[in-house]
Image (spheres, rainbow, N blue to C red):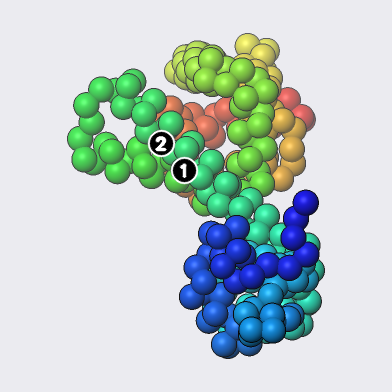
């Protein structure tokens, strides 16, 4: 059974805080014990513990002691408010860690694929990995990661890369033959092109818009990691437009 009141030493031992910290909180009026013993020793109530929880949670979010006091006075010591703030911050941190993990996984994949790389190539790899973060929101990146796992993770990514490589080679061959974009052969390839795009975006209009923006603001060669040059992209886009004509 938990005690109804805690002496300062007991509360310090239970929470991992120091007695000196609790004394300081008392001295600045941030956490004054609700009672004292006949000998003058501090006694902390359950309500004091709830306030202490809010203090610690807000301090971990980076608030100064002065700001913590103002927030608690304004919002009260209900632990739900501090908990919501802490969860929001943890979600942000987790998102940042997940994005960092994707960067590192992409870097490792590139290193294992290409072996030793020059400093210039390493800079280019990092630039490729960060490009998506300039055009996709954190929510869109999380959705793309979810779809990646749903489709089969790394194995699915490798298959998609091969599918794109095969398709781009076929489109380039038709372009070099002088095939009209409206020709049935190119129309079949255009259908595959749009299908692979939809596989990536999941049909999400906002992700599709972000993808389009990236290709408009970056060169097609840069956005596609050297797989598509501007002339080939223009040829493919004419074929796609012909499908809707």
Residue closest to the eye, 61 or 160: 61
Nearer-the-camera pick, 69 or 48 = 48
* Image quarter (top left, top right, bottom left or bottom right) of the C terminus: top right
Where is residue 215 drawn, in percent x and y? 53, 42
- Look at mark 1 in the image and give the residue it sits on: 100
Which residue is rendered at x = 67% and y = 37% of the image? 143
Residue at (78% x, 64% y) in the render: 4
Q: Is residue 106 left or right of residue 69?
A: left
Disc 2 designates what residue?
Answer: 104
The residue nearer to you, when weighing 151 against 70, is: 70
Q: Residue at x 61, y 17 (%)?
A: 152
Please state the horizontal and vertical placement of residue 20, each as a whole percent of the image: 48, 75
From what the image shows, is residue 226 above or below residue 215?
above
**Where is residue 211, by image quadrant?**
top right
Circles 2 and 1, Cβ within 8 Å, touching? The answer is: yes
Which residue: 52% across, 20% down?
154
Residue 94, how many percent across, how many down?
Answer: 57, 46
Total numbered labels: 2
């Amino acid at each position: 059974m938990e005690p109804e009141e805690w002496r300062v030493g007991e509360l310090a031992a239970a929470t991992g805080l120091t007695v000196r910290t609790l004394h300081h909180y008392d001295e600045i009026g941030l956490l004054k014990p609700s009672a004292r013993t006949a000998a003058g020793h501090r006694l902390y109530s359950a309500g004091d513990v709830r306030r202490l929880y809010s203090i610690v949670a807000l301090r971990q979010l980076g608030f100064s002691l002065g700001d913590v006091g103002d927030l608690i006075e304004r919002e009260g010591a209900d632990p739900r408010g501090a908990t919501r703030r802490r969860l929001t911050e943890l979600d942000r941190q987790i998102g940042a860690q997940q994005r960092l993990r994707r960067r590192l996984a992409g870097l490792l994949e590139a290193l294992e694929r290409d072996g030793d790389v020059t400093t210039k190539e390493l800079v280019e790899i990092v630039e490729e990995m960060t490009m998506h973060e300039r055009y996709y929101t954190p929510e869109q990146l999380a959705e793309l990661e979810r779809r990646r796992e749903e489709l089969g993770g790394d194995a699915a990514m490798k298959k998609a890369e091969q599918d794109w490589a095969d398709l781009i080679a076929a489109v380039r061959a038709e372009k070099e033959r002088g095939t009209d974009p409206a020709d049935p052969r190119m129309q079949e390839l255009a259908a595959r092109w749009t299908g692979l795009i939809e596989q990536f975006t999941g049909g999400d209009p906002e992700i599709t818009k972000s993808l389009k923006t990236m290709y408009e603001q970056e060169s097609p060669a840069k956005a596609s990691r050297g797989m598509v040059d501007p002339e080939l992209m223009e040829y493919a886009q004419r074929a796609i437009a012909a499908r809707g004509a």
